[in-house]
Amino acid sequence: MKELGYHLFAILYRIFSAFSLKDNRVFLIMTHDAGPTGNLAVMRDYMKSQKDDYIFYELRRSDTHFGKSLKKAFKFFFVDSYRLARSKYVLMDNMFLPFAFIKVKKGCKVIQLWHGTGVIKKIGFDANKGRLKELETMANAKTSQLIVSSKTTKKIYSGSFQIPENKVYITGMPRADVFFKGEDYIAKEQENFYKDYPKLRDKKLVLYAPTFRDKDAMHPKLLLDVNRLAAELPEGYILGVRLHPFVAKAFEKERGAELNKNVINLSAYPKLNTLLFSTDILISDYSSIVFEYAVLKRPMAFYVPDLAEFSDSGRGFYHDYESYVPGPVIKTEDDLIAKIRYLSNLDNEDYDKLYHRDDFIKDTYEYQDDKSSKRVYKLITD
């Protein structure tokens, strides 16, 4: 059904291609992160600051569910295909499978701004199978420029997107710019967070932000007893939980009324960067969130009770996981509780010696500055 829809979208795109491209039209395919801190929103805001005559169109994940209603189907097939056919710049943060069947108009630039600054678990061509893998390869062939942040990610993304390296550009990711803006900027963002959560002003926040596991779509669950961890935190600490929407919904249904008073569900908080700026210790696993958080030079704990399973029968990794991540690798709740207490008293210098965080940052960022949006803009508009 969906593949037939992609064919229809491509046919309508070809019909609307009879109309000329408009140099000031930008089509944003925001099917992974439509929030204000995502790569596309950051680039949209930067482009607006450079020229005030850009016209932006947005296609979000919900817009691709064209079987839900006639209104949604009409917008996707007729409105979005028309707007796409007339836009000179197409920016996307995920795969867009209709491109598998589209012949992109001459003069149109298709820019892939993948939603993660770096990558731990395998993606795209390296992870998918069957028809999906074939369609993604066909769609990615229409990409004009793939944006990355380092030589390491250039090599990985070239393979995972099946895009030649001469189309992969190291500019840095727009979403990471704010992490290099300095302490004054971070302090202002922290103040915004405390306005939203005044009770956390005098607390230290431990944030548990696990990645989405493919099997969570059918059987969402947490691998951590958050009530137990919250009860064992050092005095003055509180546990925040940020989950993928699928998992968050199940978590709220199952545990919402049973949460320890020291647990706060932050899954719906829209300002991810502001949340990270206000986090004192991050607990994650295979998520790309760690690439931005590392810049803040704060401790991280990698809680991976399913590491062997994920490595052997899940997506797998691009590096040896335990030696690559810039923090302690933890496989049991008892060890996690002990390590959080340990990290709360560990100074930055000792942390870097133990967990090679500076090397991790250098490997992730060719440019350690807040100019990535500027470099991307120059690249795509020259």
Image (cartoon, helix red, strand yellow):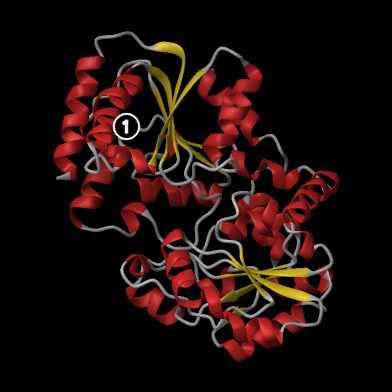
Decide if residue 57 is on the left or right side of residue 343: left
Q: Residue furthest bottom?
A: 334
x%, y% of residue 18? 24, 10
Residue 89 picture location, percent across and down? 44, 22
Q: Is residue 62 left or right of residue 224?
A: left
Residue beneath label 1, please?
A: 142
Q: Residue 11 in the image: state x and y as whole percent.
A: 17, 25
Residue 156 placement, left or right of 106: right
- Residue 172 in view: no
Assess disc 1: are there few (<14), some (14-19) or many (≥20) residues with their C-alpha within 10 Å of its C-alpha.
some
Query: Please, is residue 119 above or below residue 323 in the view?
Result: above
Asked whether residue 45 appears in the rendered view, the answer is yes
Q: Is residue 251 above or below residue 278?
A: below
Q: Quadrant of the C terminus?
A: top right
Residue pictured at 78% horizontal, 59% vertical: 198
The residue shown at (53%, 19%) is 381
